[in-house]
Image (cartoon, helix red, strand yellow):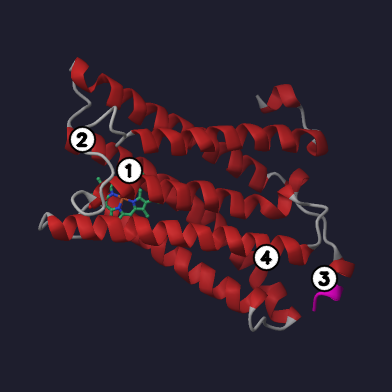
Amino acid sequence: MFAILGRNSQSNYPILLGLGEFFGALSVLFVGLFFDKHVYSSTYNWTTDPFTFHPLMMTTGLLFCYGNAILLYRTFRQTPKLTVKILHALFLILSLIFGAVGFTAIIRAKILDNESHFISFHSWLGLLTLILFVLQWICGFISFLFPKLSLDTRTKYMPTHRFWGKIIFLSAVITILAGLSELGTFSSFFVKDDAERKRRLIMNFFGVFTLLFSLIVIYLLTNPDYQRPPDEDTDQRIQ
Ligand code: HEM
């Protein structure tokens, strides 16, 4: 696909971003359908079945909102940096809220079912992702927004912030794919049984769209052609 599009950064970026958003939206739609009342008996209910909210909230927050948050500096290359910074922070706040609801949902579900916590690989990786995400959020907020550290410290910290930003996204994607496989195994719908066909298809398409969205985000994020050019005068004005 990238070979067909060539490497003209300016014109390809919106096309790839559009495709990415399409796959990202489908990923959220398919994970949401998983506990839809037309598909499954156990539908969204915070009181009796809080688990149903976990995959949807986590995917919306840590995949879709977070993926968009880390692309914003490239998406709005011409917009003043301060505006993009605020947008970046807003998307990350959204991500944090969805993540917090998703995490509360699984903790509540396990307490209700009297199940042990943090025993699977998915849960370990998920917990690590959430801890890294919160640490990155706090360090970024203090360094770049409030109280805002010196220009020298921010310049030194920036590569670390960028590095961990990508690691957290990757870690969220792996966690989601591990969660998906685990849920499939738990629910035993990966069996030759036509009653489960619909859910199996939804789950597999969810995985495919998640992967496609992530690949596009990673491609856009790591391709130097799409990097925001340094805008020193804007940086100077917002000191
Ligand atoms: C980045 C996104 C995600 C994060 C950070 C995350 C995090 C977690 C954590 C920390 C737990 C363990 C809670 C405890 O033991 O008390 C958990 C459990 C679980 N999650 Fe996720 N999750 C994510 C996405 C998903 C998705 C998309 C699915 C399903 C499609 C899923 C399915 C499950 C299942 C079935 C459990 C219960 C079994 C277990 O503890 O492993 N998760 N998740």
Identify which residue is drawn at 43% across, 46% down: 59
Residue 7: image location, x then y, percent: 78, 32
**SS label for mark 3:** helix
SS at circle 2: helix
Residue underneath mark 2: 185
Per the rendering, the mark at residue 178 is: 1
Q: Distance between the residues labelled 4 and 1?
A: 32 Å
Q: How crowded is mark 2: few (under 14 residues within 10 Å), some or many (20 or more)?
A: few
User: Cα distance, mark 1 to mark 2?
Assistant: 11 Å
Query: Is 79 within the magenta?
Result: no
The Cα atoms of the two marked residues, 1 and 3, are separated by: 41 Å
Q: Position of residue 86 (x, y in %)?
A: 67, 65
Q: How far apart are marks 4 and 3 (CA)?
A: 14 Å
> Mark 3 or mark 2, which is nearer the start of the sequence?
2
Looking at the rendered structure, the secondary structure element under dot 1 is helix
Q: Is residue 118 visible?
A: no
